[in-house]
Image (cartoon, rainbow, N blue to C red):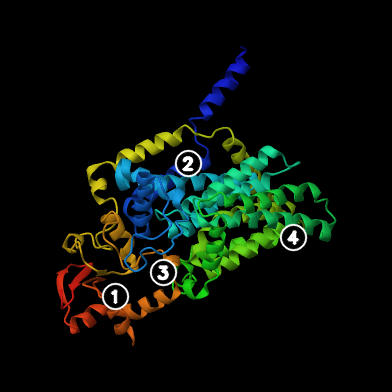
Amino acid sequence: MTGTARLVRDRAGLAWFLPDVAMVAACVTLFYCLFLFQGYQKLFRDSDAGWHIRNGEEILISGQLPHTDHYSFTRAGTPWFAWEWGSDVMAGALDRAWGLTGVALFYGAAIAAGVWLWFRLHWALQGNFLLACAMTPLFLSTANIHWLARPHVISWLFFLGTLLYCERRRGPFRWQEGLAAAVFSALWANVHASFFFGPVIALIYALGAVLRGLIWGDEGKLMLTPPLWAALIGAVAPLANPYGYRLYVHVFRYLTDTDLLAHIGEYQTFNFHAAGSGQIVTTLILGMCGGTLALVGRRPERFLLAVLLTALAIRSARILPISALLLLPLANAAITEALARAEGLNVRVSTGLAAFLGYSSRLRALDTRQNGLLLAPLALLACFALLRTPAIRAATGFAPDEFPVAAYPHIPKAARLFAPDKFGGYLIYRSAGRLPVFFDGRSDLYGAEFLKQYSQAMQVRPGWRAWWDSFHFTHALLPGDSPLIAALEQMGWQPVYRDKTVTLLAGGGT
């Protein structure tokens, strides 16, 4: 072996240990999410994580998927679509093996993997190295509003994978590709209900090829066929789920039930006046500007995707992280192309711009020489070891200042308990499903009318008493500042436990 060949081989081997910027960002995000962000606890700030975990454990134990509800006494026996059963099983298996420490690490790793793929999307789009780095804080600030131990975090990886495919796909469509697309789409459908976005994105790219031909006369046949096939496969393959076509119908009815979604906070418009919202606003502005520049650059599919996601993000906070995932890399590509084509600039600006682009290109060239993939398992092991330290392990899970952690032992086993949906998932987790709950985060199961009546009761609005009496509650577990506490005490209910987080009351006949 010549000296040159040996040097090339050594550099190639070393690249596995030297991280590129994507791996650095992923590892930093993993550490930040789990420890500085206190993800070992904040990932569980939404108690839906509780019923997801218990559902996964029950599937593993029984070997069967649920088709009716058995966690509540208000909807017991009602048909239930556990549409995220695949991610539930993963979370349940990790909880059985390592408790909530394993669940926290899993979702932290999924978030970090999303950051790594996000950078890969920038490079696939020929984005600017420095702009990608500058956009990273915007991306993380927008995405972390939904950093939760819930299945939607896994769906982010499918979104990124879909856009990577649509952007990088060239040449004729092959059967191996179709098989991979089918497996990808079916897996997505069994992990999260957002699977319908896959064929939608592919159709947008097919439409983009048509529009280029109609508007600019560009040849679009080679660009049209792959996304059309991908869209067709992505629409049919998700039928490979335990509920078949009924899952499609259920998801459609859920997402078009405006009365129901009006009562669910994460589907409401984000408060753009809140502290720290400036970076989220900047993300949306960049996404829309990038879409406009993409249209100028004859990429109508990017423009259409930017319009769709921006409109959805303004309407629903749930879409904000997805907008940051997909639109920031597209904006980077459009801005980079626009800067490279800029003409008529004065000498100083032209010189500075050339220097900026040249420096960024050199940094990207250096970055491509390494990947650091072998650091990923080492980072995971290091984080797992830190999570297992006594202090962090004791604090891992549902926060005592948000959930009835201390109050739970005071709840009688046979209680017919009223508790808000915020506590429902926690109670399912804590009791391993043995304490039937009144309400939890499965809004599609309970329906719009139930949520409306529940909201009236929580606010002690006229008519709440008749609805309340119809359930024959024996106990009520309420946040310490709930106006319902005073109303129940006036009815003769007595506090049996109280702390800074909750108050547990017993009815007069208990």
Q: Is residue 505 left or right of residue 108?
A: left
Count the numbered circles shown. 4
Element under disc 4:
helix
**Circle nearer the N terminus (4, 3):** 4
What residue is pinned by disc 4?
A: 296
Residue 224 in the image: state x and y as whole percent.
Answer: 76, 51
Residue at numbered disc 2: 24
**CB atoms of marks 1 and 3 within 8 Å:** no
Res. 473 image quadrant: bottom left
The amino acid pointed to by label 4 is Val
Label at residue 446: 3
| Nearest to N terminus: mark 2 or mark 1 | 2
How far is disc 1 from disc 4 in space, using C-alphas?
60 Å
Amino acid at dot 3: Tyr
Q: Name the residue type under label 2.
A: Val
Judge left or right: residue 269 versus residue 184.
left
Residue under numbered circle 1: 471
**Location of residue 288 with respect to 464 vertically, above or below:** above
Q: Nearer the viewer, mark 1 or mark 3?
A: 1
